[in-house]
Amino acid sequence: MFRIDLNCDLGESFGRYRLGEQEEILKYVTSANIACGFHGGDPTVMRETVKLAIANGVKVGAHPGLPDLNGFGRREMNITPQEAYDMIIYQVGALQGFLTIFNESMQHVKPHGALYNMAAKNPAIAEAIAQAIYDISPSIVLFGLSGSELTKAGQKMGLQTAHEVFADRTYQQDGFLTSRQCPNALITDKEQAVHQVVKMIKEGKVLSEQQIPVLLQADTVCIHGDGEHAVEFVKHIYTRLTEHQISVRSIKEG
């Protein structure tokens, strides 16, 4: 039987600004990537989101990004590998504190936005991130774009590494995601998203924007929680996956 982890970026509200309906989304995902304050999130939001995830039986991971609230962490910055390492240590450590008070362990780390994309292509940044996670705890799973420099770095470091694919994003023939600056970057049709996800899980391939099949590995599927119809979207994906006899379970669940 095929299986997949469903992950979602959550806890990205901060102060008076609210993003997403995470209480409903947490009913359908198996892993939560919780923002750590740099691109979104704040201490109170982090604590509340950790508590909600645990209450829903959802595994918790850190979602560290670049220090850019205004750009939501989606604008590249010219950082060094050492700076990338320090950013990961700082943000993962912050979330770990909240997990500790709930006596819960951290399942994974998934970089956010521009940091994620930079690590997918830049071996030095990827290795710095993998090293930081390993130094915190070798038992933490590293989530990275399927077949990217980040997953390669994690595997080389000896970390359990989850190859991530996307339900609501289109792909290019090189295996990378279509830039959000392009008009066709996002998939909003629910059935198109389902078709893409099922193909990635069962066939290990995705059809690129150039109509070329691209091979990939699918261990976890990202569902974005800040979309206009995020709850409806994630519920539909979850339901249709089960109809396709695909078991939805967290990465570390047996």
Image (tube, helix red, strand yellow):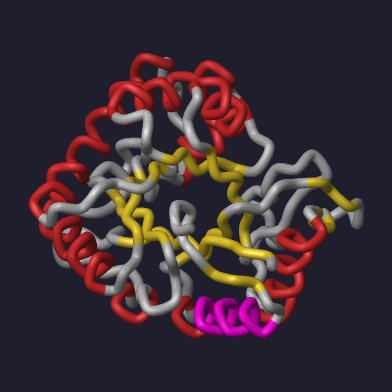
Answer whether residue 234 is magenta in the image: yes
Horizontal and vertical percent position of residue 117: 55, 38
Left or right placement of residue 144 versus residue 47 in this view: right
Which corner quadrant of the image does residue 242 belong to? Answer: bottom right
Which corner quadrant of the image does residue 167 belong to? Answer: bottom right
- Quadrant containing the N terminus is bottom right
Vertically, is 18 above or below 46?
A: below
Horizontal and vertical percent position of residue 52: 22, 70
Horizontal and vertical percent position of residue 66: 36, 36
Residue furthest to the front in view is 254
Q: Residue at x 30, y 51 (%)?
A: 35
Left or right placement of residue 66 versus residue 222 in this view: left
State whether the magenta stretch is mostly helix, strand or loop.
helix
Q: Residue at x 79, y 39 (%)?
A: 174
Vertically, is 128 above or below 142?
A: above
- Stretch of the chain drawn in magenta: 233-243
